[in-house]
Structures are given as structure tokens and as C-alpha cells.
Image (spheres, rainbow, N blue to C red):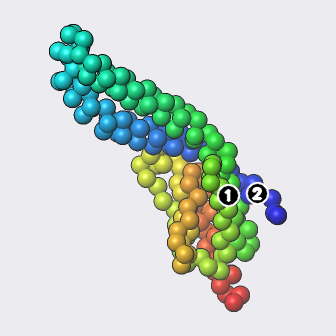
């Protein structure tokens, strides 16, 4: 078996992944906590003073939801982006692009350059704010993205892959 790809993503991609995870956890946490909190405080405030068991159950559930959101913040904002960056690797060779990614379900992609139809760079607002871009390679089977490259590196890699693709298709 051949060695894993040696090129790594730009370290700043962890900041992008952290911000994205933070936004997701806050939105999903608010989606569950706010409505439940309204119900808990509406039904439970008067009952809590009188020792109502429903108020106690609502309080425990609300505290459990808050703990779950804090745990999700720690896992998805602090831990996962670092592990994800460690596991990501790619290499652009003369005849193929080799991508290795994944934390639990690891994926190894070998994309023959002869199959490449389109190559482009993309930047969303969070990537742009961090000076990063993604390289997307399109084939008949779908799109494959290498996220988190410095803008100059992504542009140079896009042009290099386009030239290699042209050469590979001319050889057929």
C-alpha cells in the first residue's frame, strides 16, 4: 500500500471549522433550549415554589439540555477541528490527485486527471475573511473539494491541475 498524501491544509482552516461549528451548535442549541425554556418557565415557575414534581422534571431537562450544548461546544469547536486537520492530506501527482480525509470513517480518493472535467477555486465569506480558498475538482462522478488552502496556493494548484488535466487528455 502506498504512503498517505503528505501535503496538509493550511492551519487556518481549523479556525474556519471552529467558527462554523460554533454557529451550528448555537443555532441548534437555541432551537431546542429556547422553546423548551419558555414552556419550562411558563409551567414551572409557580410550581417550583410549591414543590411540584413537573417543575422539577422540567428543570432537570432544561439543565440537561444546557449541559449537552456546552459538551457539544467543547467537542465540535475545540476537539474535532484539530483532529480533522491532522487527518486531512492531499497530493497532486502527474496522473492523479490523492486525497485522504476523515476522523471515524476515513476516505482515500484517487482521482485520475484524465477524468477531471473542471477545476475551480471557491471562497465563502468565512474562508475569505481568513485568507483561504477551496479547490474543487469536478468529474462525471461528482465534485471533490480540498478545503482550506491559502488563496495564492489554491490559484496556483488550480492552474497546475488544469495543465496536468489537459496533458493527460491529450495523451489519450
Q: Earlier in the sequence, mark 1 or mark 2?
A: 2
Helix, strand or loop status at disc 1: strand
Helix, strand or loop status at disc 2: loop
Residue 7 image position (x, y, % from top left): 71, 54
Which sits in the foreground, 49 or 73? 49
**Figure check: 58 above or below 155:** above
At 70% from the left edge and 71% from the top edge, which residue is drawn?
96
Q: Is residue 85 left or right of residue 17?
A: right
Q: CA distance from mark 1 to mark 2?
A: 7 Å
Q: Is residue 80 visible?
A: yes
At 41% from the left edge and 49% from the top edge, which residue is drawn?
125
* Residue picked out by circle 2: 4
Number of the label disc, if any, that sits on residue 100 = 1
Mark 2 burial class by Cα count in 10 Å: few <14, some 14-19, many 20+: some
Q: Is residue 73 visible?
A: no
Number of the label disc, if any, that sits on residue 45 = none
Q: Residue furthest front?
A: 53
Mark 1 burial class by Cα count in 10 Å: few <14, some 14-19, many 20+: some
Identify the image quadrant of the N terminus: bottom right
Residue 60 image position (x, y, % from top left): 36, 22
**Figure check: 110 above or below 5:** below
Q: Quadrant of residue 3?
A: bottom right
Q: Is residue 37 left or right of residue 16?
A: left
Are circles 1 and 2 on residues that touch, CB within 8 Å?
A: yes
Residue 121 image position (x, y, % from top left): 52, 62
Identify the image quadrant of the C terminus: bottom right
Which sits in the foreground, 120 or 76? 76
Q: How many marks?
A: 2
Which sits in the foreground, 59 or 2? 59
**Figure check: 1 above or below 74:** below
Amino acid at each position: 500500500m502506498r504512503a498517505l498524501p503528505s501535503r496538509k491544509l493550511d492551519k487556518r482552516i481549523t479556525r474556519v471549522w471552529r467558527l462554523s461549528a460554533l454557529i451550528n451548535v448555537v443555532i441548534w442549541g437555541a432551537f431546542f433550549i429556547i422553546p423548551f425554556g419558555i414552556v419550562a418557565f411558563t409551567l414551572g415557575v409557580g410550581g417550583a415554589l410549591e414543590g411540584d414534581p413537573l417543575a422539577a422534571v422540567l428543570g432537570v431537562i432544561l439543565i440537561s439540555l444546557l449541559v449537552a450544548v456546552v459538551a457539544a461546544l467543547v467537542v465540535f469547536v475545540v476537539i474535532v477541528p484539530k483532529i480533522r486537520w491532522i487527518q486531512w492530506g492531499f497530493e497532486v501527482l502527474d496522473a492523479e490527485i490523492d486525497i485522504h480525509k476523515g476522523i471515524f470513517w476515513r476516505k482515500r480518493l484517487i482521482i485520475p486527471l484524465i477524468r477531471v472535467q473542471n477545476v475551480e477555486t471557491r471562497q465563502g465569506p468565512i474562508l475569505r475573511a481568513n485568507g483561504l480558498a477551496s479547490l474543487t475538482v469536478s468529474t462525471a462522478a461528482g465534485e471533490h473539494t480540498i478545503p482550506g488552502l491559502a488563496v495564492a496556493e489554491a490559484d496556483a494548484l488550480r492552474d497546475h491541475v488544469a495543465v496536468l488535466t489537459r496533458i493527460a487528455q491529450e495523451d489519450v
